[in-house]
Image (cartoon, rainbow, N blue to C red):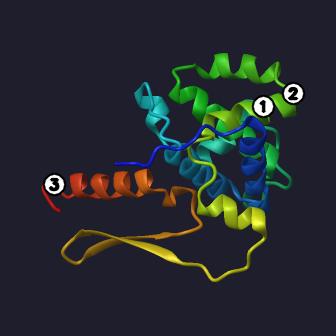
Amino acid sequence: MQNPRLPMAPEQAVSLLRAHARHAPWNARGLAAHVTSLVDAAGIRPTNASARAAPSARAVRFYVATSLIDHPEGRGTAATYHYRHLLQLLAIKIRQREGITLDGIRREMAELSGDLLERRVALALAPALGTGADQSVLSGSDAPVSWHRIAVADGIELSVRADSPAAGEAALTAMRDAVRAALGREDLQ
């Protein structure tokens, strides 16, 4: 069972989200992976099959081509994405998981200033923010990286870096259960 958390103040959520800018710049694949980790850790459940899909590098390029995400710096494999791109992709995936179409998202994003976009994304992700990853980034800690080891089955384990947005208790449990289900072994303890 997950520990109950106190509600987070909007300013704190924004501050914790801004800490993720330290991980920039990303390539398209890295940006997609970072967004997937944050959205999944927040426990935002998809409402349809298209929203269920994690963003890929190809999806990031599609969103750029269709003006849902600003153009990155550079081109091709040298393209780099920054905090603004992170916010935009997070907003897309959050709203998709809430059942909004890409056309609806495009209209919404055209009306949002950077500050409002950041605040909306931070509040949606508040359950995932404040994890060990956010705290170590905020403190500027250069402490050695530690790992969570999750036993899945005999001879199978998952390793998740402790400073990952996916290192929360609920996310770790969900990953373990998903791997067990994929193995057809939901009965494993």
**Residue type for callout 1:** Leu
Disc 3 to disc 2, C-alpha distance: 46 Å
Residue 41: where, in percent of width, then height?
Answer: 51, 48
In the image, is 162 to the left or to the right of 152?
right
Circle 3 residue: 184
In this rendering, the answer to whether 78 lies above or below 110 is below
Residue 4: where, in percent of width, then height?
Answer: 47, 43
**Residue type for callout 3:** Gly
**Residue type for callout 2:** Ser
Disc 3 to disc 1, C-alpha distance: 41 Å
Circle 1 residue: 117
Given contact means CB atoms under 8 Å apart, are the residues at marks 3 and 1 in contact?
Answer: no
Given contact means CB atoms under 8 Å apart, are the residues at marks 1 and 2 in contact?
Answer: yes
From the viewer's perspective, is the residue at label 3 or at label 2 nearer? 2
**Nearer to me, 163 or 47:** 163
| Residue name at image x 15 percent, y 57 percent | 185
Circle 2 residue: 113
Q: Secondary structure at mark 1?
A: helix
| Residue name at image x 60 percent, y 79 percent | 145
Disc 1 to disc 2, C-alpha distance: 6 Å
In the image, is 99 to the left or to the right of 139?
left
Quadrant in which the C terminus appears: bottom left
